[in-house]
Structures are given as C-alpha cells and as structure tokens.
Image (tube, helix red, strand yellow):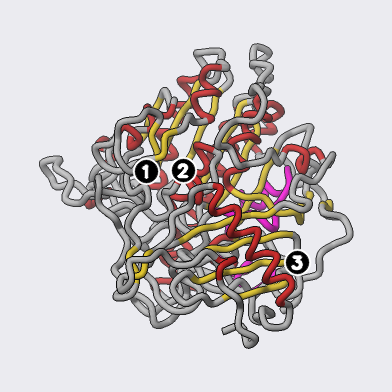
C-alpha cells in the first residue's frame, strides 16, 4: 500500500471543530486565579495499536476505525493536532525511561522490560547472549547496579512550581530499586504506580490481584486501590476517579499542575469492561475482540472524563493535553498466544516488540489552546524522548545550554507551525533482545529512520532490510539489494550513533565475540 506525503507537513481538517462538552458549555465562570503557566495532562496508553481507535492516523479511514469507538480521542483531535508519524520504543520500559530522561533507549540501556532486581527478562537464545543491559531500569542517584542515572523532567517541573501527579503505570525501575517509585522522580502524588509493567486483572471482584486478606497474589497486582475492591469498578475507572480527586485537591494549591495519566489499559489481560462489552458482542465481534474494544472505549471514557473536568473547572484555555501510546499493539499473528487477533496495527507490519512500524508507530494527539490549529494534522516524525524538552518548553522552563544525555528535540515548533525539527534527523532504535514473540522483524535488531528511508539490522544474522516508508508504509518491499548506496550510508550512521551512545549488543555464544555493528557487515546482493 502506498502512502503519499502531503506537500505541507501539517494540514487542517475541513470539518468544523467539535463543540465543547455540554458540561463545559454550562461551566461556571473561569477561575481568574489560574496560573500563567499552562496546566499539562500527559495521557499515556499501554500497548495501543495504531488502528485501535475511531481516529484515523493514516491518509485514509479503514474498517478498523469504524470498529472502535473513541469519541473523546476524536474530540481531542478536533481541538488540536494529530501526529501521523509518532514513534515510541517497541517495549514499555524503554519508552517510559526515554520519556522521563529524554535519552534514547540505546543510551539509557533499558532496552527490554524490567521487573525483578538484577534479573533479565530476556528469553534465551542458543546462539547469542543478550545479558549486559540495564535490567534495573533508571535512577536519579548512583549506587544501584545495572541502572542508568539521570534526572527527570518531572522534577524540573516541580522545581518550577508545578504540582506533579502520577496516576497508573510507572515501570521505571525494578522492584527494590529507588527508581521503582514515582516519588523518586519528582511526583508529589503517586496513585497506583510501582515496578510492574502490567496488571494481574482489571476486575475489582478479584481485588485487582490481591487476596481477600490484602496480600498480592501476583507481582503485578495493582497497589493503592483497596477502597474499590469488590465494588464492580473496573480498574480504568478507579484510576480515573482517583486522578480527578487529585486534580480537585490541586485546585486548593493555586499552582499549575502536571498530571501524568499512565493507564494500565489496554495491556493484557483482556478483561471485559461490562460498561461497553455487550454492544460490541451485539455487533458480531468475537468474545476477545469485544472485550478488547471495551478496554479501548473505557480508556477513551477516562480521557473524556479528564477533559470534562478541565472544562467544568474553567481551565480549558490554559491546559495542554497530550495523548500517546507507549508502543505498538500486541502482534496480531494468528499463531501467537491464544491465536485470536484483537489489536490492530494494519497496514503497519508486526506489533509490540518489533522494530517494524507496527511495533513503534503509535497514536499521538496534542491540544494546546491558542497554539495548535484545531483539527490539524502533522505528517513529520517525532519520537518519545522528544517529550522531555517539549514539556519543559511548553511549561516555559528554561534549561542552561544543551542537557547532557538528552537526545530528544522539542516538537513545539511543529505545534506552532514555525519549524521542522525532524528535517534531516535520524531516529535510532536498539532492541538487542528476544521478546515473547517470534518470527521475522521481532528479535535482536536495531534500526534507523532518516527522512523517507528506514534500515533494520539484525545482530545475529547480519541481515539488513531497507524500506521507503512513505511509499511502502507496510514494509513489504525490502530494497536493500537495490539501493546498496543508501544501505551503506544508513549503516554507517547507525553504527556511529550506537557506538557514541555506548549501546548494548549481543555476544555470540560460540566465540564470545560481540555481534558486529551494522557498518561492519556488507549487505549481500539479495538483501538476505
């Protein structure tokens, strides 16, 4: 399938802007004491596929956009700017660590998911050893082995006068390391954030993973939601209610607030949110598909509830809302796990854990009243580490010179339509691991995207894949053998970047030697 890049890197929808909610239209007079600095809500979803929404992020609408109901994502997009080429890492911890530190994953070394202290989550390979990455995550202070030490943008916001709230999934550091706690990173309030990257269950009937006497029966039991046990309140809703309580409290402080709303949704398990599940079954979706669609709509309702709170409190004109997913949707390979696809990345190839587009390209929307053109679309690429400088830029927090270790670039010029920080820029990914899926495009690789070209290199085999992304968004045509000049150029740039960031790479078991860097391998003529 072909994707034609528009002449302008941003466009404005021809449709009228959606009106504010009914609650917003009848809201009280705006609070004249609201701070000059904007309030900021960062709404991060877990494992959401590129097509798991009624908002199209492609150049056309598909049947998947008609399957899911996300009216509040539509509402947010109508107010702001939609990004069609937003990138994250292929796995959760890597993305979240890049978000906090502004460092590329190749630099911070948390390139797979973290959980238990000093224990790698990699699957084993008979041919290579993948040990040596930062299995304990990130930390603000030295002293913990296998961690990347860095400050966080959150603490800079707090020092600049922001009241900082964390709600939901953290997944920054392993159990019993300082980085596991959101408080460590400058969040004054932490709701349900801990070391685990998933959840045992969304169901209050199962106490979100706790026994009746209060003991967690799984490492990924959600902490801090005891009051909802046995009430029938789905975890997504419970987190939203607690976030709104924290926002209500913040109104007493007369400070700008930063809310990091990091949902566990739509990560497995695919539990049924019964507020929405029956209607999807009535439409003929399978049980699993209907359950997943209910997770998506429950997440979207949370977004709507937060937008309503902002409107009802007269803060609409002074609140920035950003929407993002932490990686692509779980792979839809029919042979994987339960064999039933339910998340959608099509036409993108592969899914979570892969450096193909389906694993790293994600939905993103930014609404900044008075700055983002309502109903606009940005076709330039951004990546997760860009949030660090962008959020500080939005908040008016000045930093002295170039921050050491910050690879991200502010995307505020894209929001203001005053510049293009993506022009001529190389995006880098490193995934020297074996995850829970198998097959081509999943394991032991690194990648570079520069302008229209994307190169993927496989450490174990030396294979290289080259794709023209605007012309081949589904990455169906490997052009490595046809364009050896581009392969050579991108291999050199990728190899140089990985060395500069002291990136981790696997080691061959038989020889004990590290796998070659991408510029140390000449691509065979057939590209295989």
Residue 26 badge: none
> Closer to the camera, 137 or 8?
137
- Residue located 38% across and 44% down the image: 171
Q: Earlier in the sequence, mark 2 or mark 3?
A: 3
Q: Are marks 1 and 2 in contact (CB under 8 Å)?
A: yes
> Closer to the camera, 474 or 320?
474
Residue 97 badge: 2
Q: Earlier in the sequence, mark 1 or mark 3?
A: 3
Q: Are marks 2 and 3 in contact (CB under 8 Å)?
A: no
Residue 59 badge: 3
Q: Residues within 10 Å of mark 3 (few under 14, many from 20)?
A: few
Q: Earlier in the sequence, mark 1 or mark 2?
A: 2
Q: Is residue 397 visible?
A: no
Q: Residues within 10 Å of mark 1 (few under 14, many from 20)?
A: many
Q: Quadrant of residue 347?
A: bottom right
Tell me if 438 is positioned left or right of 521 in this view: left
């Amino acid at each position: 399938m072909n994707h034609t890049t528009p002449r302008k890197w941003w466009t404005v929808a021809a449709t009228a802007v959606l009106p504010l909610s009914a609650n917003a239209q009848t809201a009280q007079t705006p609070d004249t004491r609201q701070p000059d600095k904007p309030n900021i809500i960062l709404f991060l979803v877990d494992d959401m596929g590129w097509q798991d929404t009624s908002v199209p992020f492609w150049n056309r609408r598909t049947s998947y956009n008609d399957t899911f109901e996300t009216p509040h994502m539509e509402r947010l997009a109508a107010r702001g700017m939609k990004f069609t080429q937003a990138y994250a890492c292929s796995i959760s911890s890597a993305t979240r660590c890049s978000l906090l530190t502004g460092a590329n994953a190749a630099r911070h070394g948390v390139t797979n998911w973290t959980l238990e202290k000093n224990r790698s989550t990699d699957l084993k390979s008979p041919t290579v050893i993948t040990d040596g990455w930062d299995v304990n995550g990130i930390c603000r202070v030295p002293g913990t082995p296998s961690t990347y030490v860095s400050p966080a943008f959150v603490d800079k916001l707090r020092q600049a006068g922001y009241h900082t709230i964390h709600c939901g999934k953290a997944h920054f550091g392993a159990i019993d390391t300082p980085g596991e706690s959101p408080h460590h990173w400058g969040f004054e309030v932490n709701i349900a954030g801990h070391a685990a990257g998933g959840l045992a269950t969304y169901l209050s009937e199962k106490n979100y993973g706790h026994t009746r006497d209060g003991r967690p029966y799984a490492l990924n039991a959600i902490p801090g939601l005891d009051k909802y046990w046995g009430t029938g309140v789905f975890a997504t809703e419970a987190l939203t209610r607690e976030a709104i309580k924290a926002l209500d409290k913040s109104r007493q402080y007369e400070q700008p607030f930063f809310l990091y709303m990091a949902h566990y949704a739509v990560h497995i398990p695919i539990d049924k949110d019964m507020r929405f599940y029956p209607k999807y079954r009535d439409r003929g979706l399978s049980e699993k598909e209907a359950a997943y669609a209910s997770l998506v709509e429950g997440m979207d309702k949370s977004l709507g509830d937060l937008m309503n709170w902002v409107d009802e409190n007269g803060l609409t004109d002074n609140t920035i809302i950003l929407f993002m997913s932490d990686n692509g949707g779980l792979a839809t390979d029919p042979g994987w796990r339960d064999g039933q696809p339910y998340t959608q990345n099509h036409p993108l190839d592969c899914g979570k854990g892969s450096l193909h587009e389906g694993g790293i390209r994600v939905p993103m929307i930014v609404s900044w009243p008075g700055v983002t053109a309502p109903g606009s679309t940005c076709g330039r690429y951004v990546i997760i580490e860009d949030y660090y400088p962008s959020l500080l830029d939005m908040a008016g927090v000045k930093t002295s010179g170039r921050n050491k270790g910050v690879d991200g670039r502010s995307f505020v010029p894209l929001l203001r339509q005053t510049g293009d920080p993506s022009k001529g820029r190389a995006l880098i990914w490193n995934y020297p691991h074996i995850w829970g899926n198998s097959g081509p495009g999943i394991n032991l690789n690194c990648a570079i995207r520069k302008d229209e070209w994307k190169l993927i290199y496989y450490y174990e085999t030396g294979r290289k894949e080259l794709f023209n992304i605007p012309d081949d968004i589904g990455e169906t045509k490997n052009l490595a053998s046809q364009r050896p000049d581009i392969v050579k150029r991108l291999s050199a740039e990728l190899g140089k970047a990985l060395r500069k960031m002291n990136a981790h790479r696997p080691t061959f078991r038989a020889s004990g030697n590290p796998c070659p860097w991408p510029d140390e391998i000449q691509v065979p003529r057939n590209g295989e």
